[in-house]
Amino acid sequence: MAAAYAHALGSDWLDPRSAVTEVHTINSYTITIMAEDNIDISQQSPIKFTPAMLHWADVVITVCKHTKEYCPPLPSATQAVHWQFTDPPKTRSAADKETLQAYRDIRIAIKHNIKGMIGGLKMMARNENSHTKPPTPPR
Protein backbone atom coordinates (compact mmCIF):
# COMPACT_ATOMS: atom_id res chain seq x y z
CA MET A 1 0.00 0.00 0.00
CA ALA A 2 2.75 2.45 0.93
CA ALA A 3 4.64 2.03 -2.35
CA ALA A 4 1.41 2.26 -4.34
CA TYR A 5 0.53 5.55 -2.64
CA ALA A 6 4.09 6.88 -2.98
CA HIS A 7 3.88 6.12 -6.69
CA ALA A 8 0.38 7.56 -7.12
CA LEU A 9 1.09 10.73 -5.13
CA GLY A 10 4.76 11.39 -5.81
CA SER A 11 5.98 9.54 -8.88
CA ASP A 12 6.76 12.81 -10.65
CA TRP A 13 9.90 13.09 -8.52
CA LEU A 14 10.10 9.89 -6.43
CA ASP A 15 11.13 6.40 -7.48
CA PRO A 16 9.21 4.26 -4.98
CA ARG A 17 9.88 0.54 -4.79
CA SER A 18 8.23 -2.18 -2.77
CA ALA A 19 9.83 -5.22 -1.21
CA VAL A 20 8.70 -7.74 1.37
CA THR A 21 10.33 -9.92 4.00
CA GLU A 22 8.20 -12.92 2.93
CA VAL A 23 7.10 -13.45 -0.66
CA HIS A 24 3.40 -14.24 -1.01
CA THR A 25 0.54 -13.25 -3.23
CA ILE A 26 -1.12 -9.90 -2.66
CA ASN A 27 -4.06 -10.32 -0.34
CA SER A 28 -7.43 -9.97 -2.07
CA TYR A 29 -8.63 -7.57 0.64
CA THR A 30 -5.69 -5.27 -0.12
CA ILE A 31 -6.49 -5.33 -3.84
CA THR A 32 -10.15 -4.54 -3.07
CA ILE A 33 -9.56 -1.61 -0.73
CA MET A 34 -6.87 -0.05 -2.95
CA ALA A 35 -9.27 -0.29 -5.92
CA GLU A 36 -11.78 1.64 -3.82
CA ASP A 37 -9.25 4.49 -3.94
CA ASN A 38 -8.70 4.05 -7.71
CA ILE A 39 -5.32 2.33 -7.38
CA ASP A 40 -4.95 -0.98 -9.20
CA ILE A 41 -2.34 -3.26 -7.60
CA SER A 42 -3.86 -6.49 -8.92
CA GLN A 43 -1.00 -7.13 -11.36
CA GLN A 44 1.82 -6.41 -8.92
CA SER A 45 3.97 -9.18 -7.52
CA PRO A 46 5.74 -8.87 -4.18
CA ILE A 47 9.54 -9.00 -4.42
CA LYS A 48 11.76 -10.12 -1.52
CA PHE A 49 14.10 -7.33 -0.47
CA THR A 50 17.83 -7.71 -1.08
CA PRO A 51 20.88 -5.97 0.39
CA ALA A 52 21.34 -4.20 -2.96
CA MET A 53 17.86 -2.65 -2.62
CA LEU A 54 18.70 -1.40 0.85
CA HIS A 55 21.91 0.23 -0.44
CA TRP A 56 20.00 1.84 -3.33
CA ALA A 57 17.31 3.38 -1.13
CA ASP A 58 17.48 6.80 0.47
CA VAL A 59 14.57 5.95 2.76
CA VAL A 60 13.24 2.55 3.84
CA ILE A 61 9.73 2.51 5.26
CA THR A 62 8.49 -0.50 7.19
CA VAL A 63 4.79 -0.67 7.95
CA CYS A 64 4.04 -3.77 10.01
CA LYS A 65 4.99 -4.56 13.57
CA HIS A 66 6.97 -7.67 12.67
CA THR A 67 8.79 -6.20 9.64
CA LYS A 68 11.19 -4.09 11.68
CA GLU A 69 12.39 -7.26 13.42
CA TYR A 70 13.30 -8.93 10.12
CA CYS A 71 15.04 -6.04 8.37
CA PRO A 72 18.81 -6.22 8.40
CA PRO A 73 20.84 -3.20 9.49
CA LEU A 74 20.58 -0.40 6.94
CA PRO A 75 23.50 1.41 5.35
CA SER A 76 24.40 4.52 7.37
CA ALA A 77 23.19 6.84 4.56
CA THR A 78 19.75 5.20 4.44
CA GLN A 79 17.01 6.70 6.57
CA ALA A 80 14.75 4.21 8.35
CA VAL A 81 11.10 5.06 8.97
CA HIS A 82 8.92 2.60 10.86
CA TRP A 83 5.15 2.91 10.97
CA GLN A 84 3.89 0.32 13.42
CA PHE A 85 0.58 -0.92 12.04
CA THR A 86 -1.15 -4.16 12.92
CA ASP A 87 -0.73 -6.48 9.96
CA PRO A 88 -4.30 -6.66 8.56
CA PRO A 89 -4.27 -10.39 7.70
CA LYS A 90 -3.84 -11.07 11.42
CA THR A 91 -6.94 -9.01 12.22
CA ARG A 92 -9.32 -11.23 10.28
CA SER A 93 -12.64 -11.69 11.89
CA ALA A 94 -15.51 -13.91 10.95
CA ALA A 95 -17.40 -10.96 9.51
CA ASP A 96 -16.16 -9.86 6.08
CA LYS A 97 -17.25 -6.24 6.72
CA GLU A 98 -15.06 -6.06 9.83
CA THR A 99 -12.07 -7.44 7.93
CA LEU A 100 -12.53 -4.95 5.08
CA GLN A 101 -12.82 -2.11 7.59
CA ALA A 102 -9.57 -3.18 9.26
CA TYR A 103 -7.87 -2.99 5.85
CA ARG A 104 -9.48 0.40 5.14
CA ASP A 105 -8.25 1.77 8.46
CA ILE A 106 -4.69 0.74 7.62
CA ARG A 107 -5.04 2.15 4.08
CA ILE A 108 -6.22 5.51 5.40
CA ALA A 109 -3.35 5.73 7.89
CA ILE A 110 -0.73 4.72 5.31
CA LYS A 111 -2.06 7.22 2.76
CA HIS A 112 -2.00 9.96 5.41
CA ASN A 113 1.60 9.11 6.35
CA ILE A 114 2.74 8.99 2.72
CA LYS A 115 1.15 12.38 2.02
CA GLY A 116 2.92 13.80 5.07
CA MET A 117 6.25 12.30 4.08
CA ILE A 118 5.99 13.60 0.51
CA GLY A 119 5.06 17.05 1.82
CA GLY A 120 8.05 17.00 4.15
CA LEU A 121 10.42 15.92 1.39
CA LYS A 122 9.12 18.65 -0.92
CA MET A 123 9.58 21.23 1.84
CA MET A 124 13.16 20.07 2.39
CA ALA A 125 13.84 20.29 -1.34
CA ARG A 126 12.44 23.83 -1.47
CA ASN A 127 14.59 24.85 1.50
CA GLU A 128 17.71 23.41 -0.14
CA ASN A 129 16.93 25.25 -3.36
CA SER A 130 16.23 28.54 -1.55
CA HIS A 131 19.89 28.73 -0.48
CA THR A 132 20.95 29.27 -4.07
CA LYS A 133 20.87 32.63 -5.73
CA PRO A 134 17.53 33.13 -7.50
CA PRO A 135 17.65 33.74 -11.24
CA THR A 136 17.58 37.31 -12.44
CA PRO A 137 14.15 38.13 -13.86
CA PRO A 138 14.03 39.08 -17.57
CA ARG A 139 13.70 42.79 -18.47
Image: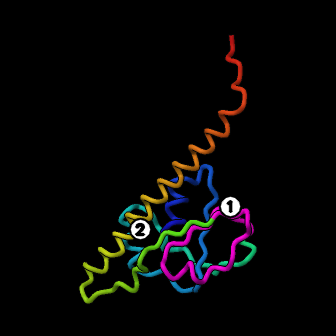
Looking at the rendered image, the quarter that the C terminus falls into is: top right
User: Would you call the spot at circle 2 few (<14 residues within 10 Å), some (14-19), or many (20 or more)?
Assistant: many
Question: Is residue 33 left or right of 22 when viewed as pictured?
Answer: left
Q: Which amino acid does label 2 sit on?
A: Met
Q: Residue at x 40, y 67 (%)?
A: 107
Question: Is residue 38 left or right of 83 when viewed as pictured?
Answer: left
For the image shown, how many numbered marks are present on the structure?
Answer: 2
The one of 8 and 121 positioned closer to us in this rendering: 121
Q: Mark 2 points at which residue?
A: 34
In the displayed structure, 135 sits above or below 91; it is above
Question: Which stretch appears magenta?
Answer: 54-79
In the displayed structure, 95 sits above or below 63; it is below
Tag 2 secondary structure: helix
Q: Nearer the viewer, mark 2 or mark 1?
A: 1
The alpha-carbon separation of the residues under discs 2 and 1 comes to 26 Å
Residue 83 image offset from top left, x and y in percent: 49, 69
Residue 31 image offset from top left, x and y in percent: 42, 74
Q: Name the residue under label 1.
A: 58
- As for residue 76 lying within the magenta part, the answer is yes
Q: Which residue is drawn at 25% across and 78% down?
A: 97
Residue 93, by quadrant, is bottom left
State the residue lying farthest toward the bottom: 94
User: Would you call the spot at circle 1 few (<14 residues within 10 Å), some (14-19), or many (20 or more)?
Assistant: few
The one of 24 and 75 positioned closer to us in this rendering: 75
The one of 40 and 98 positioned closer to us in this rendering: 98
Residue 100 image offset from top left, x and y in percent: 31, 76
Of callouts 2 and 1, the N-terminal one: 2
In the displayed structure, 115 sits above or below 53; it is above
- As for residue 64 lying within the magenta part, the answer is yes
